[in-house]
Amino acid sequence: MAAATLSDHKVADRKVADHKVRPIMDAALERTGFDRSRLIFWSVAALTTLLVIGPIAPIAMQAFLNKPLYDASATLTAANFGRLVTEAGIGEIALNTVIFAVLSTIFAQVFGALAAVVIGRTNLPGRGWLGEVLVWPLFVSHLVIAFGWLTMYGPSGYVTLAVRSWTGVTPWDLYSLSGMGVVAGLSQAPLAYLMCLGAVSKADAQLEAAARSVGAGPFRALWSVTVPMMRPALIYSTVLNFVVAIEMLSIPLLFGAPNKIETITSFLYDKGINAAVQPDYGIVGAAALILLAIVAFLVWLQGRLMVGSNRFVTVRGKASRPALLDLGRWRWFVFAAVFAYVFFTIVLVFAGTLMRASVSFLTPLVPFWTLLTTKNFDLILQTPNYMRSIGNSVLISLIGGVIGTVLVAIITLVSRRSEFKGARPLEYIALFPRSLPGIIAGLGFFYAVIWVPGLDAIRGTIWILILAFMVRYIPVGFGTIAPALAQIGDELDRGARISGADWWTTVTRIIAPLLKPALFSTFALLFIHFFKEYVTAVFLFQPGSEIIGTTMLQLWAQGDNGPVSALATIQVVITAIFVLVARRVLGAKIYG
């Protein structure tokens, strides 16, 4: 009752303050004769809607046309969906996609959640640096990770050949659905780890203490109290990892193609990019629309499952930090297990990429230091096309990061800190790209630039890539700025408005400066995501607008594994330097 009364008082106070502010705002409007705030609100809403809906509408149209979108003689038809089943064999592709996604999600959740509990709640030796290494895969593209796994654990991989020479048998097969699921799952485990780490590290110690007081041991208290508190994080990360697996391209392409195992993304890539004669735009559009609908449903389901997650909130005003669980005699055994996981699935994968880039060929039968060479790096550094791809990636990330940060900041301020009547719909639209897989975003923008008059001017340039990447990652920036904005009391807004400032003056002179740390973090996150992105670009790039990821795919298709590894190593090094600078100079918070 007291809480309800306090809430009522807050609402009443805010209404009183609004009644005081409104006459001043109206007076200012009468003096100027122009309300620029409303113009800004509607302009931001229109721009956001155009950017988000723009690439989706052409896909929906193409799915129901019998000819390419740009063909004036195209007519409406629903036959494309029928041809998906009869000609393209979508049933087997869908089954492969589901099996791959389920396997990868299981591995990601099991390893990620266990790592979060062990590192976040126990006195594990080296828990600090082990936790840092665990998140490395999140900073680079799946393409780099896939090449690393292929180099070390593929059929001719360094570790595979070493084990075969010792045992006489091949211990694993990554060119299978199960192998693909393991690789994808272990690559995505860091995402589950981060999601669950926050839940276990901030749990209320009083709950565990209560369990201990009635006779529960430390492990029983952890299992019975803390682990159930991870439910929201587990639900969120499970659906998120399932979605990531469905829209993943690199692992199905690199590991599935040799055995003709197709998932929905590799199917779209083959039909849209690698078609022998001409892409079948009807089938591609229909498949893309189905994929978009599935991912949108999963994101909606994620939101529904998270309803009521506040029941698991335990950090209140009197909460205390939970004590670390003493592993006792199991301490070093658990350390060995976690170290082995980190070493074999992360360190060796990155090391394999560097090793392959530094030798003429990689085999355990010959000491690698006798095969050292710089020719792979020389090829990259001396070839204009390859160097241009590096420069384009950096330029796109810098320009896109800055523009994207400004755009997302304005969207967040309008949707969360304004009197705009369409604020809630604007937020839904801004977050919709969570349901937009990269390959669908790229395909949608590809259709848009060849269909919408005037957009042909940016076709094949880095600007279409910047635009597509920005739309794809609006939710990332929104999720960074919105929590920081919620921590700034709205009494600052009301004080400025009472003094005669309009909305734009208030947010630019008072709110924005207070958001500076969040804005730096948003820029850093957007830079990292733009720099590692490649799936969105596969339909959009042309000679002159190549980026690192698309160049790696081209080199891989030519069988040039050495230059591929060299380019991947360069991407990892640039990313590492940027993360270091962003943390030390900008004070950006990259994760957590």
Image (spheres, rainbow, N blue to C red):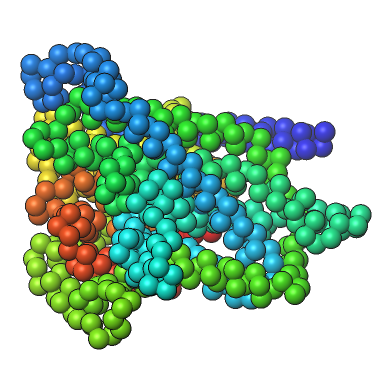
The residue most toward the bottom is 370
Residue 292 percent location from the top left of the image: 36, 31
Corner quadrant of residue 502: top left
Can residue 586 be seen in this snapshot? no
Does any portion of residue 345 appear in the rendered image? yes
Q: Residue at x 19, y 37 (%)?
A: 272
Does residue 253 sit above or below 434 in this rendering? Answer: below
384 lies left or right of 249: left
**Residue drawn at the location 65% of the way across and 59% of the way down:** 117
581 w.r.t. 249: above or below: below
Rendered residue at 33%/39% (across/down): 263
Q: Position of residue 85 (x, y in %)?
A: 29, 22
In the displayed structure, 79 sits above or below 413; it is above
* Residue 543 position in % (x across, y down): 9, 52
Q: Residue at x 48, y 45 (%)?
A: 103
The extreme front residue here reads 168
